[in-house]
Image (spheres, rainbow, N blue to C red):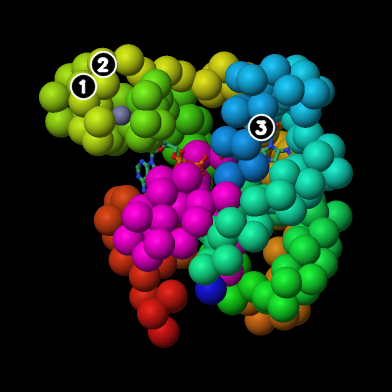
Amino acid sequence: MDIILLGPPGAGKGTQAARLQSSRGMVHLSTGDMLREAVAKGTPVGLKAKAVMEAGELVSDAIVSALIGERLDSAGGGAIFDGFPRTQHQAEALEMLLADRDRTLDHVIELMVDEEALVERIVGRFSCAKCGANYHDRFHKPKIEGICDVCGAHEFKRRPDDNEATVRTRMAEYRAKTAPILPFYEDKGLVRRVDGMAGVDEVAAAIDAILDK
Ligand code: ADP
Ligand code: ADP
Ligand code: ZN
């Protein structure tokens, strides 16, 4: 099964994708994570992407589509696309990448959220520096302060683009370029809507209900 999680920054895509990866053995493909890895390693892609990401704008379709193409075969048992596609061009590129492998999308799950609440989610977001587990200052603190629940590490990090000004640009990009791809998937009968303002477990249950239908 191949699915897309669609929603603005902070909607909960990464949180839900990580859960599906561990509960169902699907592979979480996040172009944001791939780009941050490229930036950290200083690869040619990373050098191109760094300033664009820090400004909250979109990296080129060619770069992100190539990153997905490189990883798709490693997700042969099912992929969860998180943060991709973000434009009509990317949606079309994904159709071709999947068709080349005799695969098609099963669901496009839209996480419906309130924009103002997202700013709070984003500016409070942090993650474990060692294993990447996701946390939030208010909504999802480690059980013991300063220690990762998953791996026990003591170091955490915050994304440079998780500040209010950049979030506003990222939301504007979502509204202008990503939300308009929904009709493309509506026409294919693939869009399922989930209330992303509910708690993490409720959102997870709603997604499970869709996947188990
Ligand atoms: P979030 O999940 O908070 O929306 P991501 O981690 O998905 O953020 O993306 C972080 C940044 O990486 C984006 O603001 C953008 O600059 C870049 N990026 C990630 N995925 C894509 C994509 N599919 N197309 C273009 N740019 C992307
Ligand atoms: P995205 O990948 O869509 O940008 P994340 O999954 O990283 O979003 O979530 C953004 C922040 O909000 C994280 O700190 C996460 O812990 C928190 N979060 C995720 N889902 C929920 C939820 N349903 N309710 C409250 N906080 C949430
Ligand atoms: Zn950890």
Q: Quick one: label 1 or label 2, which is nearer the N terminus?
A: 1
Based on the picture, tell me whether residue 102 belongs to the magenta stretch.
Answer: no
Toward the front, the furthest residue is: 74
- Residue flagged by tag 1: what amino acid is it? Ile
Tell me whether circle 1 and circle 2 mark residues in contact (CB < 8 Å): yes
* Residue sitting at x 40%, y 62%: 25
Is the CB of the residue bearing disc 2 within 8 angstroms of ligand 3? no
Horizontal relation, residue 27 to residue 19: left or right: right
Is the CB of the residue bearing disc 3 within 8 angstroms of ligand 1? yes
Q: Which residues are magenta?
A: 2-29
Q: Quick one: label 3 or label 2, which is nearer the N terminus?
A: 3
The residue wearing badge 2 is: 154
The disc placed on residue 147 is 1
Disc 1/disc 2 C-alpha distance (Å) = 5 Å
Horizontal relation, residue 132 to residue 76: left or right: left
Horizontal relation, residue 11 to residue 81: left or right: left
